[in-house]
């Protein structure tokens, strides 16, 4: 059976993920997928292209359910319409078909179908997992040779969820034990997580009970410093094996992040002003506009003013300013300014300045 092969997250992002100093992740290769095939026969290539396009639609939306929409189904049934290139390679004695598709038309299809679009900027999650290894329970590290570690990396890639595992060096071992993770002592886990520049941390446990695997997972906002930490989501269940447990844990995380960071075109649009201080060159302007144009909450971007190292953009949104702020706040190059500046004069706008929300951030 055809299966989606690992290698969906851009390799340059991976170098950041595995460092304790990693920042919020920017996912790449949203237009491609690698599929294992048994031959170069035309019939098998056609089936592989459908599988690849399905994977690309899921990566750009975050939800497998998008594949049931008639507009998406129609595109998947004729993958060559969106296909830009394909090729074969051999990896570990397996034949791999790599397919690339027209990313703009992928997004256009999702927008037309009023389905969520999940942009390249995605929150980074640190996963603390307690699991048994040869009769001894340990915290799963990024260097582990367990199949579960490989499965986590595969599932996070296929689902487009940036996930890192702790490196479990001396610093980690001195701060946290497997009992802390298994018992879900969130204050200890939160303290051990501070060295990792992730946006969220998840605490999970897997137990083999009889012929089943019992798991539980809770997700926490790493920036929440006040009082007792409450999980944003919690799930527990029994499944057949570790692979299913891993898949459900990653699916649980994906569903939450899609609900927070993926936005559909509801047909309504709002306008907001975004004022960025600390901008000193045209090169930075180009970089900022490229960043804004790929955010899933933004419909259009237009430069309103550039004066005294501060640039202001007029933005048309798919949702509202709160949706936009969720995305801005996971970019470590942006810091929200707490002071309030006067709203700039508008050359021409259909909405009066007092009706437009203005967001103030510092660009680093």
Image (tube, grey):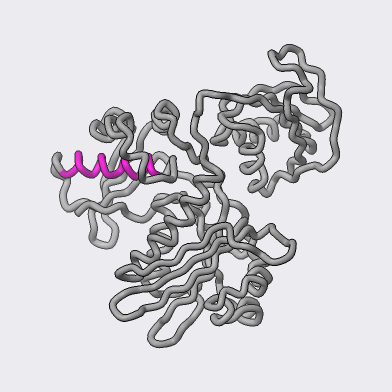
* Magenta extent: 44-58
Residues 108 and 16: in front is: 108
Residue 258 lies, with reference to residue 283, above or below; the image says below
Instruction: Tell me which corner region of the image, top left, top right, bottom left or bottom right, holds residue 68.
Output: top left
In which quadrant is the C terminus drawn?
top right
- Name above or below for residue 344 compared with residue 231: above
Magenta span: chief secondary structure? helix
The reply to whether residue 236 is visible in this rendering is yes
Residue lying at the far bottom in this picture: please name it: 135
Q: Position of residue 261 (x, y in %)?
A: 55, 43
Q: In the rendered view, does 187 fall on the left or right side of 179?
A: right
Residue 56, magenta (yes or no): yes
> Can residue 22 be seen at all in this image of the molecule?
no
**In this view, 38 is above or below 338:** below
In this rendering, position of residue 236 left or right of residue 282? left
Q: Measuring 27% from the left and 33% from the top, which residue is drawn there?
A: 79
Nearer to me, 263 or 14: 263
Residue shown at 14%/41% (left/top)? Answer: 43
- The residue depicted at 49 percent of the width and 56 percent of the height is 253
């Amino acid at each position: 059976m055809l299966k989606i092969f690992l290698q969906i997250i851009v390799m340059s992002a991976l170098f950041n993920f595995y460092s304790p100093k990693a920042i919020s992740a920017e996912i790449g290769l949203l237009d491609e997928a690698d599929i294992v095939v048994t031959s170069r026969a035309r019939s098998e290539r056609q089936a592989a292209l459908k599988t690849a396009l399905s994977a690309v639609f899921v990566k750009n939306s975050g939800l497998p359910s998008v594949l049931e929409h008639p507009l998406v189904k129609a595109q998947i049934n004729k993958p060559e319409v969106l296909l830009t290139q394909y090729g074969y390679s051999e990896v570990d004695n397996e034949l791999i078909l790599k397919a690339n598709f027209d990313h703009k038309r992928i997004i256009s299809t999702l927008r037309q179908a009023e389905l969520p679009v999940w942009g390249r900027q995605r929150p980074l999650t640190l996963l603390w997992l307690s699991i048994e290894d040869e009769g001894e329970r340990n915290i799963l590290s990024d260097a582990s040779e367990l199949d579960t570690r490989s499965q986590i990396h595969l599932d996070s890639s296929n689902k487009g969820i940036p996930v890192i595992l702790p490196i479990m060096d001396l610093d980690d071992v001195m701060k946290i034990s497997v009992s802390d993770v298994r018992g879900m002592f969130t204050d200890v886990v939160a303290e051990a997580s501070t060295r990792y520049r992730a946006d969220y941390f998840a605490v999970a446990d897997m137990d083999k009970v009889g012929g089943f695997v019992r798991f539980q997972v809770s997700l926490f906002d790493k920036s929440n410093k006040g009082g007792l930490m409450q999980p944003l989501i919690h799930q527990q269940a029994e499944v057949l094996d570790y692979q299913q447990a891993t898949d459900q844990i990653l699916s649980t995380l994906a569903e939450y992040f899609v609900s927070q960071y993926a936005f559909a075109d509801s047909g309504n649009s709002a306008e907001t002003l975004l004022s960025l201080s600390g901008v000193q060159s045209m090169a930075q302007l180009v970089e900022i506009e490229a960043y804004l144009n790929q955010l899933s909450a933004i419909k259009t971007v237009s430069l309103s003013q550039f004066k005294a190292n501060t640039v202001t953009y007029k933005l048309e949104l798919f949702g509202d300013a709160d949706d936009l702020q969720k995305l801005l706040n996971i970019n470590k190059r942006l810091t929200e300014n707490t002071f309030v500046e006067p709203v700039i004069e508008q050359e021409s706008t259909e909405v009066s300045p007092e009706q437009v929300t203005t967001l103030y951030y510092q660009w680093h």
